[in-house]
């Protein structure tokens, strides 16, 4: 038997690649031959050739994304959602061959007028229910939640028969960008974002705002709410009363916007500093050397920009472009006065709300209104922010920051362990949610003060949930079905990359057992990391940061801390997890 296979999912990352691998293995077991076209955004795609299509006895399409099937007209085709592959790939292929039907051009007229009219009515009803949706997903790190939420929205939209396109604002920039024509044709716009998104292009459209977490975990509810609660967005005007709930979490979103723009500087700066240590811990002190140049790039430039960028984009999130300049200036003053990242956060909110207040309250003649965003707001907001930072905020916050840094650098082992337990537990509590991000922001912020131990504990603990779930599916295979075992493999890989969200599918199904298991392992890892004095220069990358010499120290004990937490989480959940048979009869 010779077949051709096409797999595709909205993000082109997880489901498409996993389905292709499972089907390839099943084809081998069945002793068939197959040519596979895997639609992926992380690997090059090899499209099926005309010869391969002609030679195939059947075309199998496992996809939750649009796939051009006009090239398969005249062939026997079987189509399903990509998830159908995960339970039992071999049985799936056998069923596909049995149920495949010939794909034809459906333009013939029906000779039976009654059937034709009934079909027209049915199509009309279906068309009236079908909606066109556009969406944007974005999270602070732009790695996991961004793409997982996008895939969840795409799958739910297609399941409901709607047309949907999702633009992802990830760490590599905007992908699958929405065109002006697609926005104009949309019935509703869904913004699933944990950071601020410029909505100017959606002026006059019905917009519904939510978080990536809700879009991922409660996708159907998100879709229903979008149709029922979306309100017409007017750019530049105060949010409608329906956005009151989002205003309650506005401060968190503004902070995460600043953190997301700061992260690339932290990564680049931290790794440049680590590379300078390759030549010796104090080699950078010798002027004119490569080590000194690397330290200037990392510590003198990238780290110097961290706090101004943090403050600038917090203010930008609050007041749009007029807030950027006073935010950057306030952040620079926070840095120069020694107020550190705490001062940068204060400066960002102060600049943002000052600029917003001036924009709303200061009224000018129409002929001078154009001067407000480029002259009046930046000048007044910068003066107010700068004077407050110099005469009011700078001194006390600087003293608090110095005291915190001193405490962290000189704390005893008992305090270090306690801090590690707290940070580790927070990282595992909500798997990428607000509590997780709070601990993460704390660790990242301290990098600017050359305090590297909390960041090490945060990243180590953040790897544990996904690694632990992968280990549990290996230790107790009989308790997990086929799709859960495959999810466990993907989760383990995501854990190695410091993507805690790999554990979300397990937490969504069994939160009362998964979350405590993750917290126990994360707390142990955080405690051991702090006890061993582990230090980390970069805020992301997982174990792949090990490829950079001196980015993590000491390496062996750091790995011991991660392994210990992973064992605790994996073993505890493997013991607590109910088998499929028990859970069904319960």
Image (tube, rainbow, N blue to C red):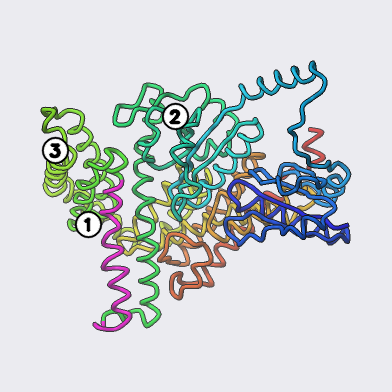
Q: Residue at x 52, y 46 (%)?
A: 145
Q: Nearer the viewer, residue 92 or 48?
A: 48
Above or below, 199 relative to 262 = above
Above or below, 432 relative to 25 = above
Instruction: Point out which mark residue 371 bears.
Output: 3
Instruction: Point out which mark residue 207 bears.
Output: 2
Q: Residue at x 57, y 61 (%)?
A: 496
Kindly indicate whether the residue at mark 1 contacts the one at mark 3 (C-beta within 8 angstroms).
no
Q: In the image, 310: left or right of 182?
A: left
Marks 2 and 3, how far apart at CA: 30 Å
Marks 2 and 1, how far apart at CA: 38 Å
Q: Secondary structure at mark 2?
A: strand
Q: Is residue 79 located in the magenta-colored stretch of the structure?
A: no
Magenta stretch in the rendered image: 286-313
Q: In the image, 464: left or right of 282?
A: right
Which mark is nearer the camera, 2 or 1?
2
């Amino acid at each position: 038997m010779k077949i051709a296979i096409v797999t595709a999912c909205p993000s082109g990352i997880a489901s498409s690649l996993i389905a292709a691998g499972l089907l390839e293995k099943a084809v081998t077991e069945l002793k068939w031959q197959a040519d596979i076209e895997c639609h992926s955004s992380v690997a090059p795609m090899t499209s099926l050739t005309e010869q391969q299509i002609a030679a195939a006895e059947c075309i199998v399409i496992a996809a939750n994304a649009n796939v051009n099937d006009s090239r398969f007209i005249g062939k026997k085709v079987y189509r399903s959602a990509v998830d159908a592959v995960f339970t039992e790939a071999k049985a799936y292929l056998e069923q596909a061959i049995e149920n495949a039907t010939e794909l034809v051009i459906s333009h013939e007229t029906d000779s039976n007028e009654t059937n034709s009219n009934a079909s027209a009515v049915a199509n009309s009803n279906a068309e009236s229910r079908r909606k066109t949706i556009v969406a944007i997903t974005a999270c602070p790190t732009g790695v996991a939640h961004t793409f997982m939420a996008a895939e969840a929205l795409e799958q739910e939209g297609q399941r409901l028969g709607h047309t949907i396109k999702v633009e992802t604002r990830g760490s590599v920039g905007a992908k699958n960008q929405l065109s002006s024509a697609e926005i104009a044709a949309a019935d509703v716009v869904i913004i699933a974002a944990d950071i601020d998104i410029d909505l100017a292009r959606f002026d006059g459209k019905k917009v519904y705002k939510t978080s990536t977490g809700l879009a991922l975990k409660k996708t159907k509810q998100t879709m229903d709410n979008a149709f029922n609660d979306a309100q017409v967005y007017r750019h530049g005007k105060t949010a409608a009363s329906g956005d009151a709930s989002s205003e309650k979490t506005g401060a968190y979103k503004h902070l995460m916007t600043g953190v997301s723009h700061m992260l690339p500087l932290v990564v680049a700066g931290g790794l440049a500093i680590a590379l300078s240590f390759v030549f010796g811990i104090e080699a950078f002190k010798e002027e004119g050397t490569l080590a000194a140049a690397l330290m200037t790039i990392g510590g003198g430039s990238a780290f110097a920009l961290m706090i101004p960028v943090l403050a600038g984009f917090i203010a930008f999130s609050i007041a749009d472009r007029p807030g950027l300049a006073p935010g950057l200036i306030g952040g620079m003053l926070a840095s120069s006065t020694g107020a550190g990242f705490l001062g940068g956060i204060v400066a960002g909110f102060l600049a943002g709300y000052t600029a917003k207040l001036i924009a709303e309250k200061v009224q000018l003649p129409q002929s001078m209104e154009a001067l407000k965003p480029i002259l009046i707001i930046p000048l007044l907001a910068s003066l107010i922010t700068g004077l407050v930072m110099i005469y009011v905020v700078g001194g006390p916050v600087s003293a608090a920051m110095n005291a915190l840094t001193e405490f962290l650098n000189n704390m005893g082992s008992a305090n270090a362990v306690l801090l590690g337990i707290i940070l580790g537990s927070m990282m595992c509590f909500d798997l990428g949610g607000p509590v997780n991000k709070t601990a993460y922001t704390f660790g990242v912020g301290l990098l600017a003060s050359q305090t590297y131990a909390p960041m090490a504990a945060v990243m180590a603990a953040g790897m544990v949930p996904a690694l632990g779930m992968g280990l549990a599916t290996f230790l107790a295979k009989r308790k997990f079905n086929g799709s859960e075992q495959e999810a466990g493999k993907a989760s383990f890989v995501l854990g190695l990359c410091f993507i805690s969200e790999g554990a979300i599918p397990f937490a969504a199904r069994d939160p009362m057992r998964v979350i405590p298991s993750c917290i126990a392992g994360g707390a142990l890892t955080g405690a051991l990391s702090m006890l061993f004095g582990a230090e980390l220069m970069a805020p992301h990358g997982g174990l792949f940061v090990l490829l950079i010499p001196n980015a993590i120290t000491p390496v062996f004990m750091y790995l011991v801390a991660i392994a210990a937490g992973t064992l605790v989480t994996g073993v505890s959940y493997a013991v607590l997890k109910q088998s499929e048979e028990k859970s069904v009869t319960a």
